Image (cartoon, grey):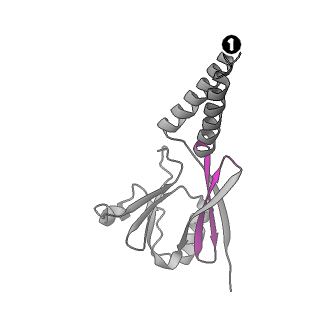
Amino acid sequence: MSETYVECLVKSQASLLGRFGKIMLIMLTVAFGILGLILWPAWLVALVTGIGAYFAWLYTDVEYEYLYLDKELSIDKVMAKSKRKRVAVFDVERLEIIAPIKSYHLDNYKNRQCKVSDYSTRVEEQPDTRYAMYYDGNTKVILSPSPELMKALKNVAPRKVFTD
């Protein structure tokens, strides 16, 4: 039995609201910390905003790790390079199509109502390196895979994987 193993790590960019919230909480922590030198109850507020800033940093510094092993693609979410959580596992046999996000191969799938999961960089680059994957009839997954991962998927399911 031939086993193929490919690993790919993708840094996801935080949303504008997440970045704004993180910066605002850090500024409030500093301001209440300085104010705490004069009024001691301000230290409690600085402590609470500091804890909020930590959690905002934890959930905005996100990387996705794609692991392909033996016809199974698993996606892990790595938060702040310290916490890991498995978010999805996909069987390549149940894959409908995977193609670049702006590919003509996806024209038949554009009007389909399905759940969308974004595990990509969330940045539209030139040229766009993100891929859309339709899985099991009801899920659309947006990925930013490496060329090695796409090659491994194409070897397993050549009629379902398009690299244009």
Q: Quadrant of the C terminus?
A: bottom left
Decide which of 97, 116 is in the foreground and name it.
116
In the rendered image, the vertical position of residue 50 relative to residue 151, given as above or below = above
Decide which of 42, 65 is in the foreground and name it.
42
- Residue 14 horizontal/vertical position (percent): 54, 41
Please identify the quarter of the rendering in which residue 109 is found.
bottom left
Q: Residue at x 60, y 70 (%)?
A: 152
Farthest left residue?
111
Q: Secondary structure at mark 1?
A: loop
Amino acid identity at mark 1: Ile
Q: Residue at x 68, y 13 (%)?
A: 38
Q: Residue at x 28, y 62 (%)?
A: 111
Q: Is residue 74 magenta?
A: yes
Decide which of 40, 136 is in the foreground and name it.
40
In the rendered image, the vertical position of residue 15 relative to residue 32, given as above or below = below
Q: Quadrant of the N terminus?
A: bottom right
Which region shows up in magenta? 60-81
In the rendered image, the vertical position of residue 70 relative to residue 143, given as above or below = below
Left/right placement of residue 94 relative to residue 58 reads left
Say which residue label 1 marks: 38
Crowding at mark 1 (Cα within 10 Å: few <14, some 14-19, many 20+): few
- Residue 64 horizontal/vertical position (percent): 60, 55
- Residue 144 horizontal/vertical position (percent): 54, 55
Q: Is residue 133 magenta?
A: no
- Residue 74 horizontal/vertical position (percent): 59, 67
In the rendered image, the vertical position of residue 23 relative to residue 59, given as above or below = above
What secondary structure characterizes most of the magenta part?
A: strand
How many numbered marks have been drawn onto this rendered protein structure?
Answer: 1
Q: Residue at x 65, y 23 (%)?
A: 41
Farthest top residue?
38
